[in-house]
Amino acid sequence: MNLSELIAKHGDDKVRFQRLDDCAEQMDKTRHGTRVVFVTPENIGLDGFDKLGLVVWLDREIVARVIAGSRKETAEHAPKEPPHE
């Protein structure tokens, strides 16, 4: 199963996401990679987080193009206001 299938079966409306750019408190390069400390509003209990968290890495430039295309498409389909007289 891929990520798109998992989200579709889980329900897109039930998925929340956080951008690490927005919630990271500390980022350090190490010998083995990058260490990131971030804050989340998700609740944690004795058995771990109440919800499963996944880290997904997407190409930043492709995401920007997809979002820009989606905004343009939405604007093109928005109802037009009548001209002012």
Image: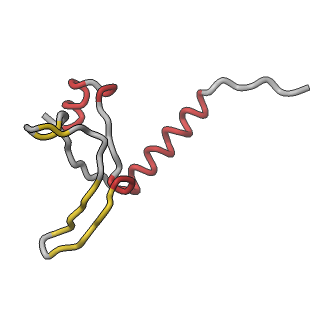
The residue furthest right is: 85
Q: Is residue 4 above or below residue 38?
A: above
Q: How is the image coloured?
A: secondary structure
Quadrant in the picture for the C terminus: top right
Q: Is residue 58 above or below residue 45?
A: below
Q: Is residue 20 above or below residue 10?
A: below
The residue furthest left is: 47
Location of residue 54 in the rendering, given as x and y in whole percent from the top left corner: 20, 44
Location of residue 76 in the rendering, given as x and y in whole percent from the top left corner: 61, 32
Q: Quadrant of residue 73 in the image?
A: top right
Location of residue 31 in the rendering, given as x and y in whole percent from the top left corner: 13, 76
Image position of 83 (left or right of 59): right
Location of residue 60 in the rendering, given as x and y in whole percent from the top left corner: 37, 56
Q: Quadrant of residue 81 in the image?
A: top right
The residue furthest bottom is: 31
Q: Quadrant of residue 33 in the image?
A: bottom left
Quadrant in the picture for the N terminus: top left
As rendered, which of 27 and 66 lies closer to the eye? 27
As rendered, which of 47 and 36 lies closer to the eye? 47
Q: Is residue 9 above or below residue 73?
A: above
Q: How many marks?
A: 0
Residue at image location 46% in from the left, 44% down from the top: 67
As rendered, which of 33 and 85 lies closer to the eye? 33
Residue at image location 39% in from the left, 49% down from the top: 63
Image position of 71 (left or right of 6): right
Residue at image location 66% in from the left, 23% down from the top: 79
